[in-house]
Amino acid sequence: PGITPVIGNGKGKMQPIYVDDLARIVRLCLEDERTDGQTFDLGGPEVFTLHQMLRVIETRLGKPNKTHQELPIAMGELFASVIATEPFKTLGNWVSRNILPLPKINEDQLIMLQEDSVADMTPAKPVFDWQFTRFSDWVQSKEYIERPWRGWKSRWLVTPPGEANPVSGAGKGTIPRS
């Protein structure tokens, strides 16, 4: 079934917010005088551990039984320090642009993986009075499925115009890059 590497214990809590919900909030903040001078902690309607989020994504990709292999934070720190130095930085950027996206992580992200990142939405609820989009729903959305970074393998599989992409199943064919 495969292995998904997880840096740290994967138990830190996070509360992902759908980009369309965030854009709507920004627009409302610009239009609604009630938000003047206020700050809001924002997050989606659900709280997940990294392991739980990965399960939702893996299920969406049709790989629900992958093993999560926890790696020590020290290994992540080593990886982050190596990919931040030349020539690895230049080489990694080239590989990500031309072959396949490589994982990118920095020391701040490693710290965040060890901490909970959740929001108290109580002050925001009366101002932004709507149902926020659940993570499992936006992972299933057309916009998420068709994101260009989702189908990197399509660089190698040129689909005839009018046919669905064989990797992502999205869209109508691709035009080869020259």
Image: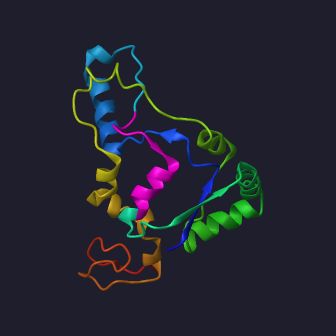
102 or 155, which is in the foreground?
102
Classify residue 150 as left or right of residue 84: left
139 or 65, which is in the foreground?
65
Depicted 76 relative to depicted 23: above or below: below
57 or 9, which is in the foreground?
9
Q: Residue at x 46, y 76 (%)?
A: 153
Q: Is residue 77 visible?
A: yes
- Residue 80 image position (x, y, % from top left): 71, 53
In the rendered image, which quarter is residue 119 located in?
top left
Q: Residue at x 34, y 58 (%)?
A: 144
Q: Residue furthest bottom?
A: 160
Q: How is the image coloured?
A: rainbow
- Residue 100 image position (x, y, % from top left): 55, 71
Depicted 4 relative to depicted 72: above or below: below
Magenta-drawn segment: 43-58
Q: Does the magenta run of residues contain 47?
A: yes
Q: Residue at x 35, y 37 (%)?
A: 22
In the rendered image, which quarter is residue 12 located in?
top right
